[in-house]
Amino acid sequence: MKLYVKARSSYRSDLEEISIKKELKQKYKLDTRRKDDFIHAGILGALRLQEQSEVHSCDELYLTSGVGNCNIVQTAKESVYDNKEIMKLFDFINILGNTTSFYVAKALGITAKSLFQISDNFTYFHSLINIYASLQHSKNEAVFGAIDVVSEDISIIKRVLGVEASVSVVSSVCYQKLSLQNKDAQAELEFDTIFYSLDEVLAIIKEEDIQVICSQRCRALEGVKPLVFFETYGASVVNELIEKQENALFIECYNEKYKILKIRAKV
Amino acid sequence: MANILKTSFLSSQGDKLSTLNAVKSAEIEVQTREVLAIEGEVKIPYYSFQVRVEDTQSAIYKVLRKQVASVIQELTAAQRAETILLVGTSIIDWNIADAIESTKELYASKKLSIDSYAKELSEEFGLNGYTLTINTACTSSANALLEANNMIDAGVYKRTVVIGCEIFSHIMSSGFNAMQLLSSSTLKPFDKERDGMVLGEGLVAFLLSCEESPWEIKGGFSNCNGVNITAVSPEGDEFCEVMEKAMASAHITQEQVTALKAHATGTPSNDLSEINAISKVFSSDVKFTALKPYLGHTVGACGLLEMALFMECVDDGFVPKTLGFEQGENENYSPMLENMACKEGTFMMNYFGFGGNNTSVIIQKKQV
């Protein structure tokens, strides 16, 4: 299966020191009321993508996340279960996953399909497969956003992610405009449905002879690994490789199952 | 397009057979639950499971497990290994809540998310390992079904289990109550006197594949188009779009729709938009019904639960009448007041929810 990246946008909290809310208000003149940090992050990434590429109303929107909106679940739990209070109306609305996709769709002018979806350990890979299958059916293009926002209490997101206390967890928002057509593409993404074993991965690495980038979960593999962690790291790798115009294999792992994404961004 | 091989469900009226019997007799049990309101705890009508399922991870997993087991029991190990699992739900992610609560250092253990139910079910039953959980409010499981259909149609996977899940939640119930969307009495879809929805619980599993089955997914369409986060326009043009594009994807016209299952929440605004949309897309002889008076509004599960019940009724030879309707706002478009004899045909299933998500699915029962 192949998808082509037509445009991309990135935000990483460890690489940019900005107030997302202020950026939305001042640069994009956006009304930030009634929305929380997770939604703001999703909208910022989308608007940055729109600066790079035309987004059509018929483009399909797919948003994914490693864990979703932690802060709003915490707010809901504390008000309803701990304090026996009614949630604020907009906190209740914001707890629905598709509230984020609604505001992102509105910001982009998309009126077609819009999904908020999570796949536990391979959320970026599995969303790519879903997008590929859907585009085969609709022949449209897709806007794909991967949103990870750290919780106000950093220990919470580390427990949800199951990473060690010493790991540096950051917020990341990466968008890609995806198509089945390679015309004007910035990169080609090639992937499959196979869960590979370590031995199979090692054999592929040997055969391919290109740089290998791994997520921090790939403990048994040698290769470029990030110093920080977020679940949708694959989305960030794709955008970075496009920036550098490089090719690579990106490898993700969980429970000794591996997924491989071939990224060709070299001109 | 994929075929629907098996369904299994649990509703407030019991299992598949008990629910069918309740529909046939029109004897529907509705309980009450207490929810938080400004004035303290208030009782609301609620379609609860007969045996209470707690809103906890372990309780939810246990009941989901039973539905999945029911639809995959005849699959061989090899077939299971090529079966993926998709979930549509709007339940709160208690995996996150537990991490918030935890005083332990659970680092470097399991990664958790709302999709963890699917991941664990997939591992327990030896399924493929591809899982995906979709949350688009009331359209969640209908959208999961369409995505599953796309994967089979594109030849990416051979077989898919799709789950819909909704369990009583204080957060959801008090939220809808605060929005003044809940009825204080009974569901009255499309009726002039309707005063809101009655929430309910539902668990449902579908097995889809290309293998022969009397039931086929013929097409569908989903959009994200609302005037605001909670509503579409009163004219219902956003609903018209999904119905028309769903029929186009199934290569049918409105005359070929044997019957339509409306979303019909019983709220003044949603029903108004929907009846206006139906009147624009269909001629006045369209047969349509609402199933929420039998099941309650099961939010994330309603996409599959209402479809499964509808299929069960047609397999039994009828399309059920709409309970709770007396007089509507559009005299030319009234839901069915009597059961309609029906053993086969092409049917439209509509789901219109929060977040601008609207979905229409076309299913067909072929002549056997």
Image (cartoon, coloured by chain):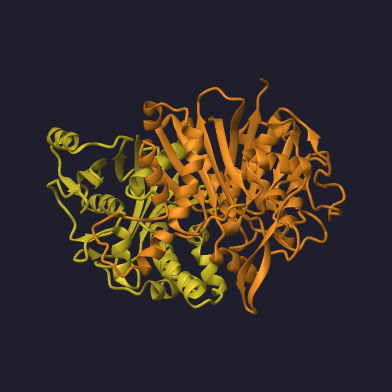
In which quadrant is the C terminus of chain B drawn?
top right
Q: How many numbered discs, if any? A: 0
Is residue A14 shown above or below B302? below
Is residue B181 shown above or below A18? above
Name the residue located 42 percent from the left edge and 37 percent from the top edge.
Answer: B84
Q: Which chain comes out orange in the rendered image?
A: B
Where residue B110 appears, x then y in whole percent?
A: 29, 54
Where residue A6 appears, x then y in whole percent?
A: 36, 47
User: Which image quadrant for residue A160?
Assistant: bottom left
Where residue A50 appears, x then y in whole percent?
A: 42, 57
Q: Left or right of B296: which side holds A212? A: left
Name the residue located 76 percent from the left edge and 47 percent from the top edge.
Answer: B27
Q: Which chain comes out yellow in the rendered image?
A: A
User: Which image quadrant for residue B16?
Assistant: top right
Name the residue located 73 percent from the left edge and 66 percent from the top edge.
Answer: B184
Foreground: A177 or A218? A218
In which quadrant is the N terminus of chain B drawn?
top right
Foreground: B251 or A71? A71
Q: Left or right of B331: which side holds A116? A: left
Q: Left or right of A131: which side holds A223? A: left
Where residue B281 appears, x then y in whole percent?
A: 74, 43
Camera sees residue A179: no
Residue lying at the far front of the rendered structure: B51
Camera sees residue A213: yes
